[in-house]
Image (cartoon, rainbow, N blue to C red):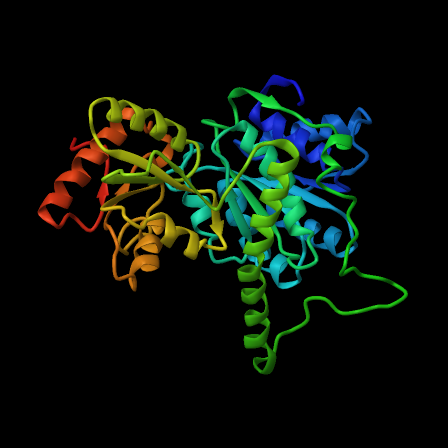
Amino acid sequence: MAKKIGIEVSLAVSEAVRAADVDLIAAYPITPQTHIVEHLSELVADGKLDAEFVPVESEHTAMSLCIGSSAAGARTYTATSSQGLALMHEILYIAPALRMPIVMTLANRSLSGPISIWNDHSDVMTERDSCWIQTFAENGQEAFDLTLHAFKVAEHPDVLLPVMVNLDGFTLSHVVEPIEMMTQAEAKKYLKPYKPKLTLDTKHPITMGGVGLPAVYTEAKKQYETAITASKKVIIDEWKEFGKLYGRHYKPIETYKTKGAEIVLMTMGSISETAMTAVDGMRDKGISVGLMRFRLWRPFPLQEFQRAVKGIKTLAVVDRAISYGSQGGPVYMEVKSALYNQKERPQIFGFVAGLGGRDVTTDTFEEIVTKATRYAKKGKGPVYEMIGVREK
């Protein structure tokens, strides 16, 4: 077992990229992901990582470079956040369409306006339909592990899709945690050298990204919808292999003290660990509560989720983003949709908390459980509720 060291989570992500032995890094600074690419630049400059480090002029260019690099057969990485992801939006959709196995870290941060550099999930939720595989880390060790897993999944010949690893900005990216690191040699037990399947070759020229006339556009879209749906098996299989090798196990839906719980919280990201502490405290008070969270967001783990909620009476979904003009948060709406045709399903109540980096504490979760319990007894509640809104 490797020795744990105290390291900032952003730097640990950089070390995971080094362990993956990437070929090219497209880098543009944006808070709060900047430390990731800064450290990668140091690793390349110091000769500790044999890779091309390209400081580009924008995030739009970063993703364009990643697509070109990946098309040339290079193991390719980038990182961004918030407005940077928004600037990538035009190019983001091209990567899965061309089946480019790019890996990107997204340090989740609020979208403007007003301008905010703090954490919520509004950036990633704007890209949930971009056909990128998306996973969520709750702590530094998971951020490290999921980065290696991302390369393994993206480059699998049955997948060949880009992967986005989400970690909460500042509340996770900038904290120092004890993390079990790996060298390139240790990582190679899991992640083998990259052998690209689809590449540009001057001796055998092909066209990538041509115009999709109406006669072929629908079939093209169907092709990568089929691909991302089928990727779930590979995602799960590669988590199982990772667990066998390193003793850390991951699942699409993960639970904490849900057995026999009358009410279950549902979260994503680093607030999940705060929620676990809150669950422990409420259990000590005799409140029958548990926690469920998404590790895998895309492809949506429908069957695993439906199995996980069986027997649960009340589900309180905590979103960190709003789908404006709709019916609450995006996770809440997808959860309701996933259970719509189920004969037995819990009462579901939606809550929005922690926007723009506002603290989500154990008291916040106790308030949510209290409200959801009250609504469940009445058999109804508000369409959704924003927690902690000041009246003045």
Quarter containing the N terminus: top right
In the shown orientation, is residue 33 left or right of residue 347? right
Residue occupying image coordinates x 16% and y 33%: 391
In the rendered image, residue 358, in percent from the top left (x then y), is placed at: 33, 29
Q: Relative to residue 305, is residue 180 depicted above or below?
A: above
Quarter containing the C terminus: top left
**Within the image, what quadrant is residue 97 found in?**
bottom right
**Within the image, what quadrant is residue 208 found in?**
bottom right
Residue that protrudes farthest toward the front in the picture: 260
Q: Relative to residue 212, is residue 75 depicted above or below?
A: above
In the rendered image, residue 361, in percent from the top left (x then y), is placed at: 31, 25
Residue that protrudes farthest toward the bottom in the picture: 215
In the rendered image, residue 245, in percent from the top left (x then y), is placed at: 66, 35
Residue occupying image coordinates x 58% and y 38%: 146
Residue 220 seen anywhere in this rendered image of the structure:
yes
Residue occupying image coordinates x 32% and y 29%: 360
Residue closer to the observer: 136 or 68: 136
Q: How many marks?
A: 0
In the rendered image, residue 108, in percent from the top left (x then y), is placed at: 48, 38
Residue 361 seen anywhere in this rendered image of the structure:
no
Residue that protrudes farthest toward the right in the picture: 203
